[in-house]
């Protein structure tokens, strides 16, 4: 897959004036943190979940030392500022409503148009930075009928055991009657790199095999951006 020129480094390109993009913070050349970068009327807004006890936010501008890489999504009309503006307001509503707890849960849940969490599995609102962004996009991309990822392809391989234990302790503290069997069923690790790769997909749900085929080209394009 030829991706040259499709990934953009933040502040490398001021156009278009309106877009929604899948974005990641880099640690060296490794995507470390997931976000959604929104440009509306030439103003930038970063929507993300920093994690742990810091709640999700919409920040104006980009104020971090990490390199930010993004891919503009084709599902939003870059010629229509109202389309992008409506998504920005939706993200703000999610931030007002959310009570998310950090943890490796991916279950295909989403947020309704008012920003309220809609659970599919019966679990409370638990997500990583990737899960939070995916849950947000699931209701916003009209091409998605069921779920963003084909989550049966993913499992708990690759979870950080220290973070996972912190998340379990936090969930125990907040949700006294949590169904731990169900929790473990939906414990899945989708990496920020896999999330970035998903920006190149237009058929949903996205399979892990599709991501596997795209990933080498995305990694190569990241390296080009860092030269």
Image: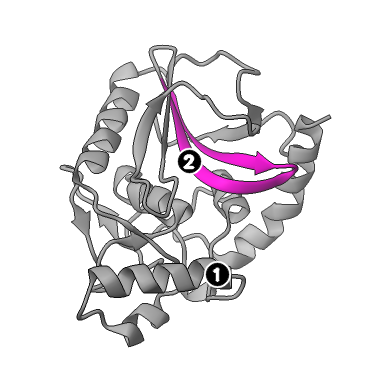
Element under label 1?
helix
Tell me the magenta residue range: 19-39
Q: Quadrant of the C terminus?
A: top right
Q: Nearer the viewer, residue 220 or 131?
A: 131
Which residue is label 2 attached to? 35
Element under label 2?
strand
Q: Nearer the viewer, residue 222 or 184?
A: 184
Q: Is residue 38 magenta?
A: yes
- Sequence-wise first label, 1 or 2: 2
Q: In the image, residue 158 lies at what x, y percent?
A: 62, 71
Tally the marks.
2
Q: Nearer the viewer, residue 157 or 27?
A: 27
Name the chief secondary structure element in magenta: strand
Q: Is residue 29 left or right of residue 173?
A: right
Q: In the image, residue 218 lies at what x, y percent?
A: 71, 45
Q: In the image, residue 177 lies at what x, y percent?
A: 20, 81
Distance from Cα at disc 1 to Cα at disc 2: 23 Å
Q: Residue at (56%, 13%) from the top-left corner? A: 14
């Amino acid at each position: 897959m030829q991706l040259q020129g499709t990934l953009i480094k933040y502040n490398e390109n001021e156009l278009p004036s309106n877009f929604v993009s899948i974005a990641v913070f880099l640690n060296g050349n490794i995507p470390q943190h997931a976000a959604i970068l929104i440009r509306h009327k030439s103003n930038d807004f970063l929507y993300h979940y920093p994690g742990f006890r810091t709640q999700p936010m919409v920040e104006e501008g980009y104020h971090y030392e990490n390199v930010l890489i993004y891919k503009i999504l084709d599902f939003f009309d870059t010629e229509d500022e109202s389309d992008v503006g409506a998504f920005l307001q939706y993200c703000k509503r999610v931030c007002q409503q959310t009570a998310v707890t950090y943890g490796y849960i991916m279950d295909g849940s989403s947020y309704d148009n008012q920003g309220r969490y809609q659970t599919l599995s019966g679990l409370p609102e638990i997500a990583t930075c990737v899960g939070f962004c995916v849950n947000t996009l699931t209701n916003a991309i009209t091409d998605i009928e069921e779920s963003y990822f084909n989550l049966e392809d993913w499992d708990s391989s690759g979870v950080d055991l220290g973070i996972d234990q912190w998340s379990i302790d936090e969930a125990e503290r907040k949700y006294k009657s949590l169904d731990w069997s169900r929790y473990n069923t939906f414990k899945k690790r989708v990496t920020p790199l896999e999330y970035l790769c998903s920006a190149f997909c237009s058929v949903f749900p996205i399979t892990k095999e599709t991501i596997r085929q795209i990933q080498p080209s995305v990694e190569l394009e990241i390296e080009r951006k860092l030269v």
